Amino acid sequence: MGPFIQPGRTNVEIRLLPKQGERGVTLLEMMVVMTIILILLAIAIPNYSASINRAREDNLRQNLRTLNDSIVQYTLDKHKAPTSLQDLKQAGYIRTIPDDITGREDTWVPDEDDSIMSLEQTDPGIFGVHSGSSRVASDGTVYSEW
């Protein structure tokens, strides 16, 4: 039998608060702590999600800048535009083809054109690249428009 139920007694004593001098945590105290934790989580989780999304978008911007700068540099150095992102990798302008915001490297969409970027260029190729994602960014634009 529990400490509050004694044989021969007809009434059962249930206590929510400890008697003076007793140690322990009451149900009420635990509920208050749990409520505070839940409130803090309700504030922290959306902020965390927004931070992760902002970091992914910043990473996409940096990857686009790197790839587009590498395409221009390749075109000026080789006097022809690359025909694919693999050309940049094979020529050493980039170590690896970075992942698009979709999480895959094969979703980049090259901007192909017949225009010539330098006087010595003989063949057309890609002059830029953008994301293949159709998702909407935090600023309201579509990633594929970046």
Image: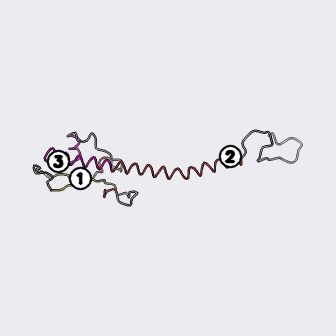
| Horizontal and vertical percent position of residue 36 | 62, 49
| Horizontal and vertical percent position of residue 108 | 28, 51
**Gap between marks 2 and 3, in whole Å?**
66 Å
In the rendered structure, which amino acid carries the disc numbered 3? Thr
Q: Are marks 1 and 3 in contact (CB under 8 Å)?
A: no
Q: Is residue 67 magenta?
A: yes
Earlier-in-chain disc, 2 versus 3: 2
Q: Are marks 2 and 1 in contact (CB under 8 Å)?
A: no
| Horizontal and vertical percent position of residue 11 | 86, 48
Pointer 3 local density, CA inside 10 Å: few below 14, some 14–19, many at least 20? many
* Residue matched to label 1: 128
Identify which residue, 105 or 10, lies in the foreground: 105
In the rendered structure, which amino acid carries the disc numbered 2? Met
What label sits on residue 30 in the rendered view?
2
* Residue matched to label 3: 75
Quadrant position of the N terminus in the picture: top right
User: Can you say whether 145 is above or below 83 in the image?
Assistant: below
The part of the chain drawn in magenta is 61-90
Q: Residue at x 59, y 52 (%)?
A: 39
User: Is 32 situated left or right of 104 in this image?
Assistant: right
User: Main SS of the magenta segment?
Assistant: helix
Q: Residue at x 22, y 43 (%)?
A: 88
Q: Are marks 2 and 3 in contact (CB under 8 Å)?
A: no
Circle nearer the viewer, 2 or 3: 3
Secondary structure under badge 3? helix
Pointer 2 local density, CA inside 10 Å: few below 14, some 14–19, many at least 20? few
**Gap between marks 2 and 1, in whole Å?**
59 Å
| Horizontal and vertical percent position of residue 81 | 17, 49
Q: Residue at x 18, y 56 (%)?
A: 113
In the rendered structure, which amino acid carries the disc numbered 1? Gly
Q: Is residue 42 magenta?
A: no
**Gap between marks 1 and 3, in whole Å?**
11 Å
